[in-house]
Image (spheres, grey):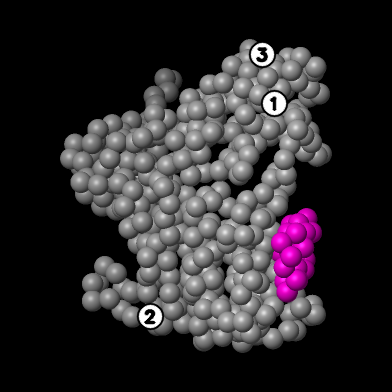
Amino acid sequence: MANFFKVTPKTQNLGKQCKLKISRLDFNGCGVGAYQQKTIFIDGTLPGETVVAKVVEQKNKYYRGKLLEVVSPSEHRVKAACQHFSSCGGCDLQHLNHAEHLVFKQQKVTELFERHKDVQSSVKKSKNPANKITLPWQESINSQAWHYRRKARIGVQYNKNGQATIGFRQRASNQLVAIKKCPVLVEPFAELFNPLNELLAKLSGVNPIGHLEVIFTHVNTLIIRQLVKMSAQDRKHWLTFSELYQCQIMVDDGKSIEPLTACETLNYRIDDDITLEFDADDFIQVNHQVNTQMVAQALEWLALEPQDNVLDLFCGLGNFSLPLAKRVENVIGVEGVDKMVIQAKKNAADNHVNNCQFYQADLNSDWQSFSWAKETFNKVLIDPARAGAYKAIEQLVKLNIPQLLYVSCDPSTLAKDSALLVSHGYKIEKIALIDMFSQTKHIETMVLFVR
């Protein structure tokens, strides 16, 4: 008996073209419309646009489509500045006017806050039913929209013939886009891809490089993740590259990072006269201009007084701690990574800051028994990773600190943590976007809570 292929409901619309209108952007900056009574997500589209798309994925509750044509473009649509925008996964919003980036991000933060009843009950309700709450938004912290990123990892992949591709990951893929230039990177590195490609083609050995990393501070730095022992000839190639492109080079063998050329210590300046030293594998904020403004705004919002005793949780290298210490009686900085604590202590000593002590602690576990937690603080700053600070805040609210400044790099965890703070008597006094990652969907926020 012959077997005939029968189209199942899960595949019957794959490959079909559809014409539809985009109603909004989701939290990833992807256009959202409706097709066959289901939600359809289409990258590269904007609210109000009529588009033609092809269905490329079909699930029980939604479709994904590939944009084929913009029939009626949004007034906010602009031509992407990067030739790789349609394929590279690094940026999400280059097709949207930059001023509208902030509108989109502010709306997303508000929508996330609206999901929590505690937050809803603590802020004013808007007369506009589409916007249930009105948060006390302040002016956003901005920088130049291009050439702002001072630190980035550049991927390296080899094909079966040993030819290297360098660049960034494609959207929703582990494969790399072969980048020719990147307008998001700071100027010294934006057009370094072709020279690097040429150099990698000369290297000996099989798949010798894992990835490359660039860091720009007062000096250009290139870090090579070396997978095999570097040959003498390869060393000469890199030394020539260093001289030609005026960058110091370090080699990471997976165990340590050692200089290949004469290397200056990595550091950056903050708050006019503070120099923060860091190692190549330490976390630093990638947008120096925004970081400078962010620290200044934190100092302003906390309305610091000489008698203040401030707690800085998730303090890192002392990015906030040392500027705080210049203005108050005492600062306690706490960080989970011991290596960062050691560096923060050195930074305090190097900058002659004597009223700032640093401690190591896992802030997502029980830390209230530590001696530093038994001190009396009247202000606190928290700057957690994307996972947020829920466990830390559960303990922090017991300290009855009147003012709390939260610097967030994830709006979902910020909304959850904010609801917890509000439920314990805190009020949202101010909130502002921090445009740390221009052209992308990533949202950073600063919120001032008062009790």
- Element marked by disc 3: loop
* Residue 357 placement (x, y as % from top left): 75, 71
Q: Report the residue at 43% width, 20% height from top.
A: 1
Q: In this view, does 146 lie to the left or right of 393?
A: left
Question: Measured along the vertical axis of the image, is residue 445 above or below residue 392?
Answer: above
> Tag 1 or tag 2, which sits nearer the N-term?
2
- Within 10 Å of disc 1 (Cα), the crowding (few <14, some 14-19, many 20+) is many
* Residue 62 placement (x, y as % from top left): 37, 47
* Residue 70 placement (x, y as % from top left): 23, 36
Residue 219 is labelled as none
| Residue 223 seen anywhere in this rendered image of the structure | yes
Q: Distance between the residues labelled 3 and 2?
A: 62 Å
Mark 2 residue type: Val
Q: Report the residue at 29% width, 69% height from top.
A: 131
- Within 10 Å of disc 3 (Cα), the crowding (few <14, some 14-19, many 20+) is few
Q: Mark 1 points at which residue?
A: 209
> Tag 2 or tag 3, which sits nearer the N-term?
2
State yes or no: residue 291 in magenta: no
Q: Nearer the viewer, residue 307 or 437?
A: 307
| Residue 316 seen anywhere in this rendered image of the structure | no
Q: Name the residue under label 3.
A: 202
* Residue 428 placement (x, y as % from top left): 45, 78
Q: Report the residue at 43% width, 60% height from top.
A: 141
- Element marked by disc 1: strand
Image quadrant in which you'd find residue 68:
top left
Question: Measured along the vertical axis of the image, is residue 18 above or below residue 292?
Answer: above
Mark 3 or 2, closer to the camera: 3
Q: Name the residue under label 2.
A: 123
Tally of numbered discs = 3
> Tag 3 or tag 1, which sits nearer the N-term?
3
- Element marked by disc 2: loop
Q: What stretch is highlighted in magenta?
A: 335-362
